[in-house]
């Protein structure tokens, strides 16, 4: 269980002080290198403010609630979940109509997330992860269930009140700018192998963790080699965490795929040239 919690913390990239590892990402902004430090060691077990109940994990009363701890318990414990929803919960449908969910039982029948073992984080700037280092400053986070094929998403809005996180709203919406253009591209990129290969840089920057801290495979590969190295990528439906990140450069997107229980971390860098997006860097 500690391993699952450990990697769930990493998937959210909430980077509290008690996590420590580093990953280096080679970017492509006029040949300047971007770097991302991601924590990997757990030296203080008291950081995990969980206790067991009949229905699973809940947060202890003395927990200093960071969002990644909260959402782990929220998803896996229906009793805790019901306690952390502001009922009646307002729901906005695709056509703009509204209704309310009045009970935990009704909510559980509708709270459907893909059966993935990962979450994603879509960023416009890797330095924005620094915002998550001070989780207590965050007062609002959205958990987005993105349906690429339908070009829609279900947004679960969480707000902090008196130090505790609560689900306050759910809305079904179309893709929002500035991610709309990228997600429209990514839907085809993730489902059309020919289009994907055409959308990979001729010389792709590539870095792979070999498991040896002193040795890392790093360099470039030809576009034609991509199918041999390509990892499993987020598909038609996936969960994205939106903590309020912005996209200052409309021509660059970082997509981070973070494993819940397997230690996976894949970093994909996409650049846009004209109207076309291209994968220019991959690191795991």
Image (cartoon, rainbow, N blue to C red):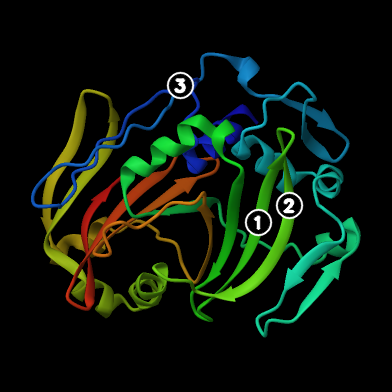
In the rendered image, residue 230, in percent from the top left (x then y), is placed at 29, 59
What kind of element bears circle 1? strand
In the rendered image, residue 132, in percent from the top left (x then y), is placed at 48, 37
Mark 2–mark 1 contact, CB under 8 Å?
Answer: yes
Bin the neighbour count of mark 1 within 10 Å (Cα to Cα): few under 14, some 14-19, many 20 and up.
some
Residue occupying the point 35% across, 58% down? 247
Query: Does residue 76 lie above or below 181 as drawn?
Result: above
Q: Would residue 190 appear left or right of 236 to someone viewing this image?
A: left
Q: Quadrant of residue 226?
A: bottom left
In the rendered image, residue 78, in percent from the top left (x then y), is placed at 83, 48
Mark 3–mark 2 contact, CB under 8 Å?
Answer: no
Query: Does residue 254 lie above or below 68 as drawn?
Result: below
**What residue sits right under mark 2 in the picture?**
167
Q: Would residue 123 appear left or right of 138 to someone viewing this image?
A: left
**What residue sits right under mark 1 in the picture?**
157
**What residue sits right under mark 3 in the picture?**
41
Query: Does residue 160 lie above or below 213 as drawn?
Result: below
* Real-space Cα separation, disc 2 to disc 1, in angstroms: 6 Å
């Amino acid at each position: 269980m500690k391993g699952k919690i450990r990697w769930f913390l990493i998937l959210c990239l909430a980077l509290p002080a008690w996590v420590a590892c580093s990953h280096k990402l080679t970017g492509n902004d006029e040949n300047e290198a971007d770097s991302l430090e991601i924590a990997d060691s757990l030296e203080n077990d008291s950081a995990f403010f969980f206790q067991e109940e009949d229905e699973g994990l809940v947060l202890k009363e003395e927990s200093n609630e960071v969002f990644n701890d909260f959402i782990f318990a929220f998803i896996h414990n229906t009793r805790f979940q019901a306690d952390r929803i502001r009922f009646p919960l307002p729901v906005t449908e695709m056509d703009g109509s509204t209704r309310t969910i009045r009970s935990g039982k009704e909510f559980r029948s509708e709270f459907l997330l893909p059966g993935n073992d990962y979450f994603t984080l879509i960023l416009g700037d890797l330095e924005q992860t620094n915002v998550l280092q001070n989780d207590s400053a965050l007062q609002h986070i959205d958990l987005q269930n993105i349906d690429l094929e339908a070009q829609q998403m279900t947004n679960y809005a969480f707000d902090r009140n008196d130090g505790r996180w609560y689900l306050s709203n759910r809305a079904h919406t179309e893709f929002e700018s500035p991610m709309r253009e990228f997600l429209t591209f990514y839907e085809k990129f993730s489902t059309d192998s020919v289009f994907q290969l055409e959308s990979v840089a001729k010389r792709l920057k590539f870095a792979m963790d070999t498991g040896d801290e002193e040795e890392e495979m790093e360099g470039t590969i030809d576009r034609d080699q991509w199918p041999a190295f390509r990892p499993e990528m987020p598909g038609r439906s996936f969960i994205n965490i939106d903590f309020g990140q912005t996209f200052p450069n409309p021509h660059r997107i970082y997509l981070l795929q973070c494993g819940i229980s397997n230690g996976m971390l894949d970093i994909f860098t996409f650049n846009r040239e004209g109207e076309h997006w291209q994968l220019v860097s991959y690191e795991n």
